[in-house]
Image: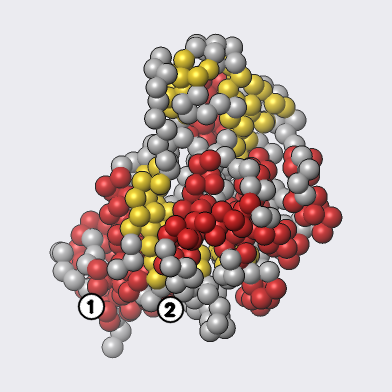
Amino acid sequence: MPVNFPELIKLKRDGGELSLADIHAFVQGVKSADIQESQIGAMLMAIWQKGMSDEETLALTKAMMNSGEVFVWPEEWLVVDKHSTGGVGDKVSLPLAPALAACGCKVPMISGRGLAHTGGTLDKLESIPGFEVNQSVEQVKQILQDVGCCIVGQTETLVPADRVLYALRDATSTVESIPLITGSIISKKGAEGLSALVLDVKFGRAALYKDLDSARHLAQSLVTVGNRLGVKTGAVLSRMDAPIGRCVGNAVEVCEALECLKGRGPDDLTELVTALGGYLLWISGHCHSLETGKIEITQKLKNGDALKKFQAMLVAQGVPADVAHSLCSDATNNFQYMKKAAHQTELKVPQDGTVLEIDGLALAQVLHKLGAGRTKSGEKIDHSVGAELLVDIGQWVMKGQTWIRIHHNSTELSTHQRSDLQTALVIGSSNRYKIESRVAEFIYPK
Ligand code: URA
């Protein structure tokens, strides 16, 4: 019997619970285009308004995952990954994937591109000459076999239903729905064939969720569904007000990630890499506690093993061997291999005091306008645009001191851009300032 989609929409619209068969039929309809776009939009809005039970969210996630290919790896591999809900200056994946590979894990990291103020890992990596994010399943398998990690774009065959649903969620203002976000993220991670997954769910001014409670709510849904899908899943709730590290952009963030891989990255970046990596090593069963996991990741960053894996990954993904070698050599000024912006403009601190805040959102919005980000998917971006922060939160600064260097290709920053940037810097008079750690809370697998 053909599925009666209007009846399913009515059921959800009126607050009823969809059965497993209903949800399967809906996702199949999306995949095979048997359902009209208007009906998909109406169902998305009904889900947005009425929500879904845990059972429904799990059924949606499973149906989405099975709408395409599901990777199967050799049984002896410990296959792990991380997903972040997106932030400003978030280059954590770049050191984390090779650090985990250096611990013996396999990391088939499928990443995305930046949209609006958040940067994308693929865009960052594409600022390295030759880096190829498009790899076939066979190539991914070979790189995992030879190197242990890769960072690639989504293949055509993985979760095709999400591509349709995601575009229609965007068009129908139904993106911010916990069951829909859970289905979208966990179906793709489930299709990667993971043993364990850690989610970095961010909260704060520059994050999707502004407060800890709503981030926790999302994290709990992701963790519940991930575990019920058979992937050992945990989450870290992390603060996202100021940018992570001191660099924001694409090429500049790769340079900072390389510093982290050389054991001398900024404290907050290193904290996130060790916390997320250590947590993953623990929940995956690789080690017996969070602390031992963190120690192992720290060692791999300090002893050069993670850096060697990163270098091998670059070569496996198309970067000429001499470029990869130079980028990863200790003495290199990394900028020499990256495309440079034509201009650098430095802004000055307006008064003596302590740096209380650096507003990551305001900074990212200016960089976006200068070409570092995209407004619509598919748009080209300028990898050389970015910012280097020259002061830290909690630091005492003096009037006239340089606090930020902007790399740009437009001849001059406009008055507006300068004033938006200056309002991103908040100076106060207190000289006692407690720097909060990035990690606020762990959500354990259940
Ligand atoms: N990332 C995804 O892949 N899907 C969402 O719905 C939100 C973030």
The residue labelled by disc 1 is 19
Residue at 63% from the left image edge and 43% from the top image edge: 264
Residue 358 visible in this rendered orientation of the protein:
yes
Above or below for 10 versus 275: below
Q: Where is residue 47 drawn, in percent x and y?
A: 26, 62
Q: Which corner quadrant of the image does residue 206 belong to?
A: top left
Badge 1 amino acid: Ser
| Colour convention of the picture | secondary structure
Question: Which mark identifies residue 60?
Answer: none
Above or below for 180 versus 266: below
Q: Which corner quadrant of the image does residue 64 belong to?
A: bottom left
The residue labelled by disc 2 is 66
Lateral position of residue 394 relative to residue 224, left or right? right
The kind of secondary structure element at disc 1 is loop
Lateral position of residue 318 relative to residue 1, left or right? right
Assess disc 1: are there few (<14), some (14-19) or many (≥20) residues with their C-alpha within 10 Å of its C-alpha: few
